[in-house]
Image (cartoon, rainbow, N blue to C red):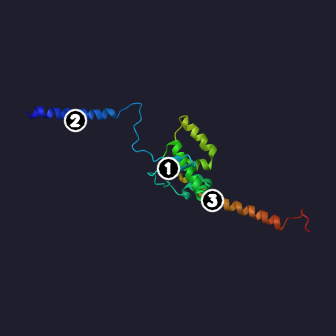
Amino acid sequence: MARTTSLPLIVTILLAFAASTISAFTFGKKAPAASKLPLPTLDTETGRYTKSPNDDGAYPYDAVGSALRHGPSPFLTRTFNADEYEQGILKYMLSANVDRSEATGNIDAKLNNAMDWSYQKMAEKNGKPKVDYTRLDRKQAVLTVVWALGITPLALNVVFNTADQFINSPGPSVIKQ
């Protein structure tokens, strides 16, 4: 008698397992997102974007991280025009349906070089792999630091010394009064 009562239980367990295993193989369909993105909303009266209550507003990296990844333009925009920068992030989050991290990387890349960024986005639409703009390339970071602390001050020094020499001792071709 114990055999007949446990058989339906075993069959039910096996069917439940088979159903869950088969549903994992839905060919051609994307699995639903595990969590909904905290997308911003657009206030049509003011034309401004408002972040979602579920969005903590934290950037994936700070302003120095923007400079190391994408150069001075996103760094300056983020530092001196923070509201416009945040509005750009929120607008990109809503229009591209992405999270804050991906939006930050894309806005920084666009501020650095809009033409290359647009070209990459078109290439992605045509099947090229997606670029992760939030990734910090060590080689690029070292080059940025070398340029910021070495080459740029050297170039400015040459320009200022040349201008100073020209102003203070113009040479034989300029008539002094």
Residue 8 in sight in this render = yes
Q: Which of the numbered marks, if any, corresponds to residue 100?
A: 1
Q: Residues at badges 1 and 2 in contact (C-beta under 8 Å)?
A: no
**Residue 10, placed above or below residue 156:** above
Can I make out residue 132 in this image?
no
Query: In the image, residue 95 lies at what x, y percent?
Result: 53, 42
Q: Give the mark toward the camera: 2 or 3.
A: 2
Residues at discs 2 and 3 in contact (Cβ within 8 Å):
no
Circle 2 is placed at which residue position?
A: 13
Earlier residue among tags 2 and 3? 2
Name the residue tied to disc 3.
Answer: 148
- Residue at point 11% right, 33% down? 3
Element at label 1: helix
Residue 56's x, y, as percent?
Answer: 46, 54
| Residue situated in front as seen by the camera: 8 or 123 | 8
Amino acid on which disc 1 is placed: Arg
Please name whichever residue, 116 or 1, is drawn nearer the observer in this view of the structure: 1
**Which secondary structure, mark 2?**
helix
Distance from disc 1 to disc 2, alpha carbons, whole Å, reads 42 Å
At x 49%, y 51%, the residue is 51
In the image, residue 44 lies at what x, y percent? 55, 46
Residue 81 vertical position relative to residue 15 in the rendered view, above or below: below
Kind of residue indicated by mark 3: Ala
Q: How many labels does the image show?
A: 3
Q: Residue at x 17, y 32 (%)?
A: 8
Q: Residue furthest front?
A: 45
Q: Give the mark, 1 or 2, whose residue is nearer the N terminus.
A: 2
Residue type at mark 2?
Answer: Ile
